[in-house]
Amino acid sequence: MAVHGEVWSVSDVFDRAPDDRVQVLDTDGELVGEPPDLSDAELIDLYRHMRLARHFDERAVTLQRQGRMGTYPPLAGQEAAQVGSAAALDDRDWIAPSYREHAAVHVHGLDLSDILLYWMGHGAGGWSTDANVLPAAVPIATQIPHTTGLALASKLRGEGSEPSQQPGDAVACAYFGDGATSEGDFHEGLNMAGVFDVPAVFVCNNNGWAISVPRERQTASPTLAGKAAAYGIDGVQVDGMDPLATYQVTRAAVEKARTPGERPRSTLIEAVQYRFGAHTTADDPSVYRNEDEVEAWRQRDPIPRLERFLRETGRLDDGAVEDIEASVRDQVSTAIERAERAPRPDPEEMFADVYADRPSALRAQQTYLHRLRDRHGDDAFLKE
Amino acid sequence: MSTETQNLTLVQAVRDGLRTEMQRDEDVIVLGEDVGKNGGVFRATEGLYEEFGDDRVIDTPLAESGIVGTSIGMAAYGLRPVPEIQFMGFIYPAFDQIVSHAARLRTRTRGRFTCPMVVRAPYGGGIRAPEHHSESKEAFFVHEPGLKVVIPSTPADTKGLLASAIRDPDPVIFLEPKLIYRAFREDVPAGDHTVPLGEAAVRREGSDVSVYTWGAMTRPTMEAAENLAEEGVDCEVIDLRTLSPLDRETIVDSFEKTGRAAVVHEAPRTGGLGGEITAILQEEALLYQEAPVERITGFDTPVPLYALEDYYLPSSTRIEDGIREVVDFP
């Protein structure tokens, strides 16, 4: 989805104090800031993508509970930050995601059934995209220096695929959580982004909890956005459950990244939000946080918030909402069917892409596995 | 010593070992991600926060290098930190601290400063886990002089080896086979219980072939040995328990009896401990050797995601197949 609109002037967004949180819609869906200059269709598309993400998430959790999928990290509550920010990127821009960014990577071009196949244990079997999206980083914060590297390469060379493109036109965008800001890679990646002044956007999806450890236990800093100052880059805090605000701020950061000028090209965006569900389906959040807290954050749910705004401004009515709901259900069902129809990968696929050219020892191991399967049959290996 | 026992799973034995050592020695401190209020993502530290408080069971920021580096400082000061790394696949940010500092603090100060620290981490595959949650990279740490490396395979050994590791004057990497965290129960001595580091256990005596293994691979190896016994092949199964330092004496004694050997590990084949064990046999018992040493291991590929992991991990079928190669030679 490529949406474009005029954004606030750079100084409005980046001269704020780190705790001066940007908001466009309040929790009732009332305008409290300047809305992005998006067409009705583009605004409705933001809404649709958030509904899609929520429904995908609900189905994915159910698939895991039914034993049809492995451990899965849910995103419910975090749709606005993912959809709003990814919608502000162009196709030529890059995303280096963590493992929870199903919505952001889908907006940027990943197929839903490929995302499902990864969590169904098929790994690279589900990698069929030409989008500029790196595979999800599971080790925390490790994708942050990659983002600096993507942006540095863009600054030095340009992307190459579009002849008209100037070096630095492609922006690299990292996604990571609040816990990631405690890792060394966060420091090293942002520090180098500042030193090399690269076109990067670092989106910190601060959902309040790194598994059981609250944000207050990650850092004694009053904000995460404020950490940007240490690296000489811009930092801004945004209401991460406000899709219009996350779009606005990300779009401003992207424009600034593309345009060398007075300000640092890199930005750290702290999108304040909440994970409604568990860290993963293997986690039980009732051990470490109480239901009142979850309920309080549910009042800030990004989806009804945008829906109320769209309805009250006459952009959306019951019929349109029903249509969106139906199409979202169809789309997710189709993706699940496609993923579940995919046959178990060929066991010898594991040898396929370890190197460009398979070394002889690896070929010998492949032959050995082939012989074993011939001798004993696949049933002798499979536990289920 | 008490003869009282508790019937525990392996992960409960981790907890019991930690608790017993924390009661015995107030210098023992647990720290890591989610080890406190949450009781650990595998519940290995459940209840410790409530019993010992947040000065001794410390929820840390999400920072593996910070957790281990902080532990090294605490150990140099005189405490006995037991940092937890949530999964072995996430230990690498701490690798620099472990190999550049923990492993050689004693050497660099001629013993003035030491690092009596135990880094606990669940390792290994077979639980349908996401990417980076199934690795078995014990060889990295065995390769580093100054570290000890321990992998238990039973609940009683888990408690006893963990207690010995905590009391050990040097840094220990304590890898827990999460595949069998809850696979079975065993009577574990209550209270004080140690199992010495550096001693292998003969899990099954046999005369035809020596099979060396450890951790989660011990069970399918035992299963293979029992199946082969029905065919008249008598396997001796040796659970190494401590991978550094290796119990060379037990390894060699068994081979001198059987003259044939297989090594089973789930780590990739190249550079795995199978090569080291084979070299020991060559050095110490060449003239007893009657067949090539067979390595039954993970492949030299990244651990595949779970749809294919049953093909990657040595199963009893594969282990039997490999052992037959050894006993049928020439």
Image (cartoon, rainbow, N blue to C red):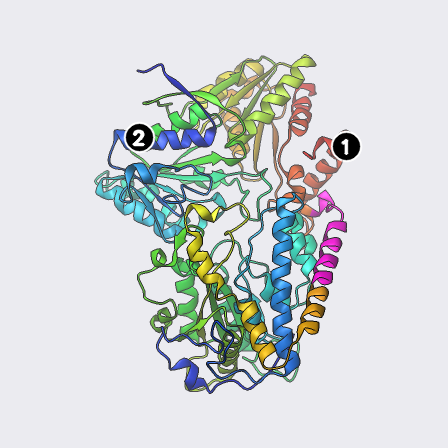
Residue A135 in the image: x percent, y percent? 59, 59
Q: Which of marks 2 and 1 is in front?
A: 2
Tell me the residue at 31%/35% (across/down). Answer: B170
Query: What's the residue type where badge 1 is placed?
Result: Gly
Q: Point out which mark residue B256 bears.
A: none
Image quarter in which the C terminus of chain A is found: top right
Query: What's the residue type where badge 2 is placed?
Result: Glu
Residue B175 in the image: x percent, y percent? 45, 36
Q: Is mark 1 on a helix, strand or loop?
A: loop
Q: In this view, does B11 lie to the left or right of A373?
A: left
Marks 2 and 1, Cα distance to the nearest angstrom? Answer: 48 Å
Of residues A81 and A322, which is closer to you in this image? Answer: A322
Magenta portion: prevailing SS class: helix
Res. B66 in view: yes
Provide the chain ID for the residue under circle 1: A
Q: Point out which mark residue B21 bears.
A: 2
Of residues B286 and B109, which is closer to you in this image? Answer: B109
Query: For residue B297, what is the image quadrant?
Result: top right
At label 2, counting other C-alpha atoms closer than 10 Å, the crowd grade (few under 14, some 14-19, many 20 or more) is many
Tell me the residue at 71%/54% (across/down). Answer: A336
Compared to residue A75, the image places residue B258 above or below, namely above
At label 1, counting other C-alpha atoms closer than 10 Å, the crowd grade (few under 14, some 14-19, many 20 or more) is few
Q: Give the range drawn in magenta.
A: A329-349
Res. A150 in view: no
Q: Is residue A342 magenta?
A: yes
Where is mark 1, residue-wise?
A377
Q: What element carries label 2?
A: helix
Provide the chain ID for the residue under circle 2: B
